[in-house]
Amino acid sequence: MSSIKHHLNDALLMGYSAGTLPEAFNVVIATHVSLCDECRARLEAFDALGGTLLDDVDEAPMDERSFASCMTRIANADRVPVPAAPVTDLPAPLAAYVGGCLDAVSWRRIGGGVSQAILKTSKSATVRMLRIPGGVEMPDHGHRGTELTLVLRGAFRDEQDRFGPGDIEIANEDHVHHPVAEPGEDCICLAASDAPLRFNTLLPRIAQPFFRI
Ligand SMILES: [Zn+2]
């Protein structure tokens, strides 16, 4: 999808390649990679580099020549197939978690017209789908830890930028923002976080434990 403007960073791609991230993050990263040629190419380079470093583990520290040969091997590495074509109306890595297509998602209302569906993953982080009606603002929140939000349908804006289909927003502790779904169709996102969101208003904070957000 060539219209993607917001991509994964190197740290997340490396963590995904090395298998060190929580499952919830892997779902979001794999889904973005399935939509994004640019991140798929970068991931393949990290996969090849990881394999090369393992191959060379008994050899002397890398000098300039072995670095050059490493880069050549990366360029010549076999391409790891990542499913690019959606088999349903959802990207393939996500469809497996949801049980098929968008209609199969069990939405649960969380107030303000917003619905969510928490996907089943290991407990170190959570990942959920969010459906936000056009023009509706998400509760005002900051973050503890890291939150990844991938847009599947529609779009949202915050103070800094616009995020459309395929775009991924990477938010951290310093990032307090006011995301609002663009007017029009519902904005459907996939969001993973490794800590509960820190809501700034009282009511969502009270409701937080009930909704695991
Ligand atoms: Zn990307």
Image (cartoon, rainbow, N blue to C red):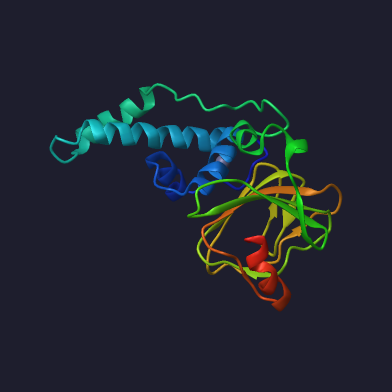
Ligand 1 found in image quarter: top right
The residue depicted at 82 percent of the width and 54 percent of the height is 133
Give percent across and percent down for residue 119: 62, 46
Residue nearer the viewer, 196 or 65: 196
User: Which quadrant is the C terminus positioned in?
Assistant: bottom right
The quarter holding residue 1 reads: top right
Give percent across and percent down for residue 161: 68, 57
Give percent across and percent down for residue 171: 57, 60
The quarter holding residue 137 reads: bottom right
**Location of residue 26 with respect to 108 vertically, above or below:** above
The quarter holding residue 157 reads: bottom right
Q: State how many labels appear.
A: 0
76 displayed left or right of 97: left
Q: Residue furthest bottom?
A: 202
Q: Residue furthest front?
A: 210
The residue depicted at 73 percent of the width and 31 percent of the height is 89
27 displayed left or right of 189: left
Give percent across and percent down for residue 76: 36, 22
145 displayed left or right of 198: left
The residue depicted at 66 percent of the width and 38 percent of the height is 98
The residue depicted at 56 percent of the width and 32 percent of the height is 37
